[in-house]
Amino acid sequence: MSVATAAWVFASAPSKVPFYVAGGVLAGWAVLLGAFGITHPDFPGSAGRSRLIMLTSAVLVAATLTTAVTTAGEEGATEGAAARTGSAAPTSALNLSADPTGRLAYDKKQATVRAGRFRIRLVNNSALPHNVTIVKGAQVVAHTKMVTGGSATTTANVAPGQYVFYCSVDAHRAGGMQGTLTVK
């Protein structure tokens, strides 16, 4: 794997691990300072040590804030707008989940994929049968099989443009189980 490929992977799916590490170190530092301060009444003992402790604390807070901002993104993304509306950055797969409570809804109303061949995956943990159908105008481009309590996968090969994805089971599309697929 080349450095450029590795950089693209990390840029497209930021890992939360640096934030967790920085936050853990900051929390550990706070506990250590508290415990040491309680057991040693003369702590920190001098103005120089006081400044060093404040500087260390400020650096750890800054590191935690920086990693929080730099690792914020879609990965892990069942939170925030990215999870509700889909990714603006093109991916090589369309991953959808049907609402597990039985509502006629996917977890995304919008998604973006790269032009060419891509994978379509539907996870349906509800008792209602669902599928994913992709159309451009009146032409069906691809569809998964209908699935209940499981997953279905297929592939599609598409040109750039706007498409619609929806569930073609009964009146599910009319009930709101649809979204927009942008192919770039």
Image: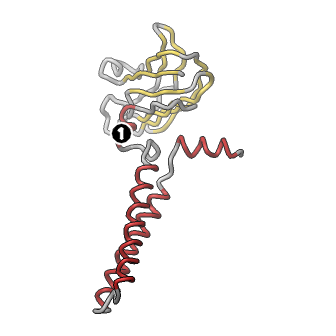
Spot the residue most to the right. 1
Count of residue discs: 1
Residue occupying the point 44% across, 18% down = 164
State the image quarter where residue 4 is shown. top right
Residue 18 left/right relative to 2: left
The image's colour scheme reads: secondary structure
Position of 177 relative to 42 (above/below)? above
State the image coordinates of residue 143 (x, y, percent, origin top left). 52, 21
Spot the residue most to the front. 47
State the image coordinates of residue 181 (x, y, percent, origin top left). 46, 22
Residue occupying the point 40% across, 77% down = 52
Residue 129 left/right relative to 158: left
State the image quarter where residue 45 is shown. bottom left
Residue 144 left/right relative to 168: right
State the image coordinates of residue 29 (x, y, percent, origin top left). 39, 75
State the image coordinates of residue 57 (x, y, percent, origin top left). 38, 71
Instruction: Classify 10 Å Cα crowding around label 1: few (below 14), some (14-19), many (20 and above).
Output: some
Q: Nearer the viewer, residue 18 or 158?
A: 18
Indicate the amino acid at tag 1.
Pro
Position of 102 relative to 73 (above/below)? above
Q: Nearer the viewer, residue 163 or 126?
A: 163
Residue occupying the point 47% across, 54% down = 16
Residue assigned mark 1: 100
Give the quadrant of the C terminus: top right
Q: Nearer the viewer, residue 144 or 51?
A: 51
Q: Secondary structure at mark 1?
A: loop
Residue occupying the point 40% across, 69% down = 26
